[in-house]
Image (tube, coloured by chain):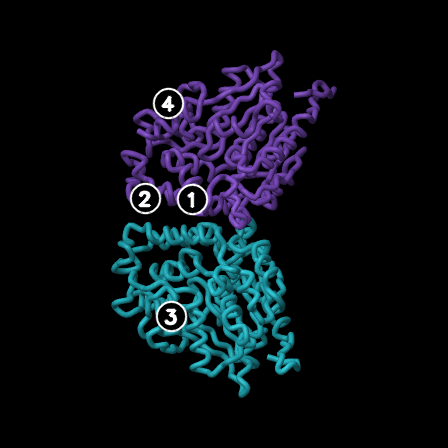
Chain colours: A purple, B cyan
Amino acid sequence: MEKISYYSQENHGPYQVYNLGDFELEEGGIINDCQIAYSTFGKLNPRKDNAILITTWYSGTSKIMEQVYQGEGRAIDPAKYFIVIINQIGNGLSTSPHSAMDGLKGAKFPRVRISDDVRAQYRLLTELFGIESLALVVGGSMGAQQTWEWAVRYPDMVKRAVPIAGRARNTRHNFLFIETLKYALMSDPNWNEGNYTDSNLVSRGLKHHADLWSVMGFSIEFYKQELYKNLGFSSLEEFRVGFTQGYFLPMDPNNLLCMAWKWQKGDVSRITNGDLSAALGRIKSKVLILAIDGDMLYPPSDCEADQKLTPNSEMRIIHSYAGHLGLFGIEPSFSEQVDKYLKEILDTPIEKKISGKSFSLRN
Amino acid sequence: MEKISYYSQENHGPYQVYNLGDFELEEGGIINDCQIAYSTFGKLNPRKDNAILITTWYSGTSKIMEQVYQGEGRAIDPAKYFIVIINQIGNGLSTSPHSAMDGLKGAKFPRVRISDDVRAQYRLLTELFGIESLALVVGGSMGAQQTWEWAVRYPDMVKRAVPIAGRARNTRHNFLFIETLKYALMSDPNWNEGNYTDSNLVSRGLKHHADLWSVMGFSIEFYKQELYKNLGFSSLEEFRVGFTQGYFLPMDPNNLLCMAWKWQKGDVSRITNGDLSAALGRIKSKVLILAIDGDMLYPPSDCEADQKLTPNSEMRIIHSYAGHLGLFGIEPSFSEQVDKYLKEILDTPIEKKISGKSFSLRN
């Protein structure tokens, strides 16, 4: 049972689990005994206003976010902040198709939306920690979708929001890309409508799915300059097989499909009947949009549209040849740039108005 | 037999056929009775120096090139030039897997290279028409690969070369993209190692192959602005199914794979043992590289590399939201821009040096 060991504490822990009980989904299903996996770093201060939420991207878990986005001496420093990294539903650590109870298992797993994740995360933070203010919400790609959803859905709770390489409403182009990802998995001869007996049998589909990421996840320049050699791969083929295929192969296809559907349909404007301007207009957080210049999924020219509709927002461009998957922190300069911008926004005092008076709130 | 009717004179004609006899390929195979399909417009002048060669791209035939790249009053005007459009081997009109004789049919078809096409085209032009000078060679994408190969292989014959949205040596990134195209076709449950009984049976693979083109062939901005509505498609799904899938569905998968392999391996530096600078240094033509700004396959930043290595070359950027498949002339402004640049280079006299004297040659 290689899959179980992949989504294990050994690989992705230590992480804890919070049980939401029966969790109702926006699409109408219920996840019984819904477990949300999370990890924390640092301490919550007595005023409970130093909490930072980090969200997860497609296929990512709390582990990569722990490794790449926080640490001592970093902008998100556990010496200063209480950092909570919450795994999205379907990512293999929180309740997911591969681990769900019998009636919900595998292909039977219900449709989950970004907004379900954000509501689950809200419950975890408020019920478990009594957190009612977040100094920052930050995440990349699907994590950016959750960040946007947080800022729109809980405008008074989120003081700062940093969506990296992701959109408030997913794009048509990305919708098509995800269609090809889904097809890649479902075209495997052993797919069996999602009722495969062992996800290893779906390796052809998983490899093709990984190849699609090799095309869209990096950048033309990344390959032109053979930057995969910096990662220890001596050839294009070694990189393709050893890095991208190697990354996705141990994952569960139904888990990936759960996230793929959610990603595809991500749209903060569902709360305002499809009016994106109205949805983003609800935001009270200070928003800093980070876009990656080599990103073939969400290039800066694309992310600009959200910035224009969001009050009190700014945008910065991160230079990365690695493209969208620069999010993995493949280049040291990526983390340096992210830290610089995170420090900038974290050091910006937030104006809080109470009874007509305004005062500055540090965290 | 729908396929036969797709690759027919009704759809793609009128075209003529030149028989090369037994044609030896660089990879070692032989195409017996090799037929090269071509169409011509205008008249060859007595000096035989007004000929223009137009090459074809992946899946394209002489018909689309006739419709989009030449015409009365256009830069490439049949009133002035003798225009020869030659179909690449494997495209369905020239000898191809679907139409080859028994021993070479379907999956048995041998590997063909861009250089094989260019040698075949050279024979056609010299043997059939006695042409020894080309006023211009022009083509897009794989047609640009042939254009580059022409300029490198026959430097004295090609006076002007205009490769559009294509590279002299294919890129690593594009190699990976084509891997996904190939897999898409070969993963069809009815693929049967290329020995399908009817290409209609491979429709799942052909549709997925088309979807990959929907992602990479256009641009993010094209979808953001819903420019497919200008083509008469009211929704993204209608466009995806009606345009891109509809375009590829009647084609033969083995034909596409023949071209895919050729495209993937395109490299003018094979003639100089892999030294691209030396290969491009052989060129004597005036070269004008046209790159498309929205191109997700070969963006201008990528095409620049060829320009820097090519003597007597310049580059111009075509603005097109349609991206790589802007080559189809989807936007009227695309053809206007191409014509402007083609006119520019066609109106540039070519210096020809004979016995130390130089004089200007108009065509």
Drawn side of residue A189 relative to residue A21, left or right: left
Distance between the alpha carbons at the discs numbered 3 and 1:
38 Å
Residue indicated by mark 2: A188
Distance between the alpha carbons at the discs numbered 4 and 3 = 60 Å
Same-subunit check for callouts 3 and 1: no
Tell me how far mark 2 sits from mark 4, CA to CA: 30 Å
Task: Look at label 4 and name its amino acid.
Answer: Asn
Circle 1 marks a residue in which chain?
Answer: A
Q: Residue at x 65, y 32 (%)?
A: A340
Q: Would you place residue B356 above or below residue B311 in this image?
A: below
Residue A314, given in percent of the width and then of the height, sits at 66, 36
Give the mark, 1 or 4, whose residue is nearer the N terminus: 4
Using the rendered image, report if marks 2 and 4 lie on a common chain.
yes
* Cα–Cα span, label 2 and label 3: 33 Å
Residue A288 percent across, percent down from the top left? 63, 33
The residue closer to the viewer here, A4 or A281, is: A4
